[in-house]
Image (cartoon, rainbow, N blue to C red):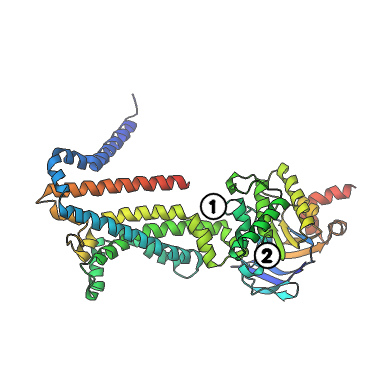
């Protein structure tokens, strides 16, 4: 398992400082949740780690390797966007197989790997379905399987629980946790929802206006919120927790 | 008393609609009046030549337009440079409004010295400029939508290089747009007259197209003009219906 380290990363869009000196360390096989209000820079952070955006300053490290200048297609990072981003013209099987195909794996190997993943996310029998014939929860499972097919060193999840109804949410949460027990992968997940963050995260980084303002285990943050802004951001959970 | 303005609007609209429909279909009325003459004109070798030259050159223009549209749309989608929107206007909007006569003259001056004037190649060159923008604009629009959806970024993160992005994402997803662009380009190329006439002339079985033939025979041998027109119009109606079918399905 590999660690992720974000060191002093800044990113501007015109005059807007979307990321302002971000430092973040994710332990091997840990699930780190970056939580903050909409527009705080969460998705920008994901895209910089993924390699879709170049940081203006700072560097990204996986284990002891600086990958800041490694192009996106060589980073080997799994990514599941908020809308799942399934390839609309390919069926479930081909969506999952995509990364293996472009990397030139032999057909027998692709077959074995896709079968294994279909089983792991519980989608056996749906190989031939097109994305538009799937439910929200199923789409996300395909997106997860597709991202994991390339044996990524890191998994990035953008708001994995926010595009789905409450019923599906329980299913997806179970999927994610079950899958992570089977495939012990270092994961960075961003969300604006404190409830989701506290349910999912091994540790939580609170992000506000381009900065990480507190990072720690869920109970640490609840016990000692660093300041009023943190209190405000975690308010829905904080209120419940203080009643105990 | 009923609304007079409403009545006037409805009457005007009906008049315009009837006028447009008659304009489209009158050719078939004229055809009916001189049925036997037109029929014998259809057996005319020169008419056959014009059909072959028109259809073959329009297909070539359509194929070239697709070959040109893919890289151009890719660059317009993925490269950021100053003056991109102006360049787009020059590539897509201007050719469709540029006077074809002038464009024919430009090519005569530009390529004439190279010996290309009055050849079959000149027909293709003249038609390409006014017709290709349809395909380019269709491809550019779809490529942009794909980029905005982010699936290209996901494909890259899975290891895809530009060849995979083109071959496995952009082209298959925009297949219908390219086909629709092709059919509009083809139809526009079929109808092009002025640029072709000036740059390529009208040599039977070499550069004479259906529109050129109609133009040249409309006074002396009207039945030939009618025969050529009926074929041209029928082909354009068919290609438009085909386009509607393709475009309708892609939604």
**Left or right: residue A33 compared with residue B227:** right
Mark 1 and mark 2: span between their CA atoms? Answer: 23 Å
Q: Position of residue A160 (x, y in %)?
A: 70, 53
Point 25% across, 63% down: residue: B123
Point 44% across, 53% down: residue: B177
**Left or right: residue B116 compared with residue A231:** left
Point 79% across, 66% down: residue: A28
Nearest to viewer (mark 1 / mark 2): 1
Outermost residue, top direction?
B1
Residue designated by label 2? A77
Q: Which SS class for mark 2? A: strand
Q: Position of residue A174 (x, y in %)?
A: 77, 49
Rendered image quadrant of residue A97: bottom right
Query: Which tag, 1 or 2, sits closer to the chain's start?
Result: 2
For disc 1, the chain is A
Q: Vertical placement of B209 versus A129: above or below?
A: below
Depth check: give the residue in front, A24 or B54: B54
Outermost residue, left direction?
B220
């Amino acid at each position: 398992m590999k660690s992720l380290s974000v060191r002093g990363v800044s990113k501007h869009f015109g005059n807007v400082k979307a990321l302002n000196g971000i430092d973040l360390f994710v332990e091997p096989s840990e699930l780190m949740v970056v939580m903050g209000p909409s527009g705080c820079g969460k998705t920008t952070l994901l895209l910089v780690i993924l390699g879709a955006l170049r940081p203006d300053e700072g560097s990204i490290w996986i284990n002891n390797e600086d990958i800041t200048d490694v192009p996106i297609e060589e980073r080997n990072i799994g990514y599941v966007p908020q809308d799942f981003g399934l390839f609309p013209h390919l069926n479930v099987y081909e969506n999952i197989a995509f990364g293996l195909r472009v990397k030139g794996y032999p057909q027998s190997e692709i077959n074995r790997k896709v079968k294994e993943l279909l089983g792991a996310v519980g989608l056996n029998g749906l190989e031939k379905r097109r994305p538009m014939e799937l439910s929200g929860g199923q789409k996300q499972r395909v997106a997860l399987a597709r991202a994991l097919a390339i044996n990524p060193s890191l998994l990035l999840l953008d708001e994995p629980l926010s595009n789905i109804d409450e019923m599906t949410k329980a299913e997806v949460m179970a999927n994610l946790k079950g899958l992570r027990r089977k495939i012990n992968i270092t994961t960075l997940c961003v969300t604006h929802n404190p409830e989701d963050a506290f349910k999912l995260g091994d540790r939580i980084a609170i992000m506000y206006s381009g900065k990480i303002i507190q990072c720690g285990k869920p109970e640490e943050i609840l016990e000692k919120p660093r300041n009023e802004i943190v209190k405000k951001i975690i308010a829905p959970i904080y209120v419940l927790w203080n009643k105990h | 008393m009923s609304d007079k303005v409403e009545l006037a609007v409805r009457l005007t609209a009906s008049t315009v609609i009837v006028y447009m429909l008659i304009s489209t279909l009158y050719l078939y009325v004229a055809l009916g009046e001189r049925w036997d003459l037109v029929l014998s004109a259809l057996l005319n070798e020169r008419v056959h030549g014009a059909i072959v030259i028109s259809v073959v050159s329009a297909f070539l223009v359509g194929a070239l337009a697709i070959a040109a549209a893919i890289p151009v749309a890719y660059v317009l989608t993925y490269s950021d440079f100053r003056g991109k929107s102006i360049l787009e206007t020059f590539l897509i909007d201007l050719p469709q409004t540029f006077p074809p006569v002038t464009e024919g003259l430009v090519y005569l001056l530009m390529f004439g010295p190279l010996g290309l004037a009055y050849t079959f190649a000149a027909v293709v060159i003249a038609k390409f400029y006014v017709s290709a923008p349809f395909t380019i604009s269709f491809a550019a629009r779809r490529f942009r939508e794909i980029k905005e959806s982010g699936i290209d970024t996901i494909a890259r993160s899975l290891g895809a290089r530009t060849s995979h992005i083109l071959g496995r994402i952009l082209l298959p997803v925009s297949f219908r747009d390219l086909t629709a662009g092709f059919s509009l380009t083809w139809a526009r190329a079929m109808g092009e007259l002025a640029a072709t006439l000036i740059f390529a002339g009208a040599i039977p079985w070499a550069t004479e197209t259906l529109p050129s033939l109609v133009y040249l025979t409309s006074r002396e041998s009207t039945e030939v003009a009618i025969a050529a027109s009926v074929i041209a119009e029928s082909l354009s109606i068919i290609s438009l219906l085909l386009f509607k079918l393709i475009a309708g399905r892609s939604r």
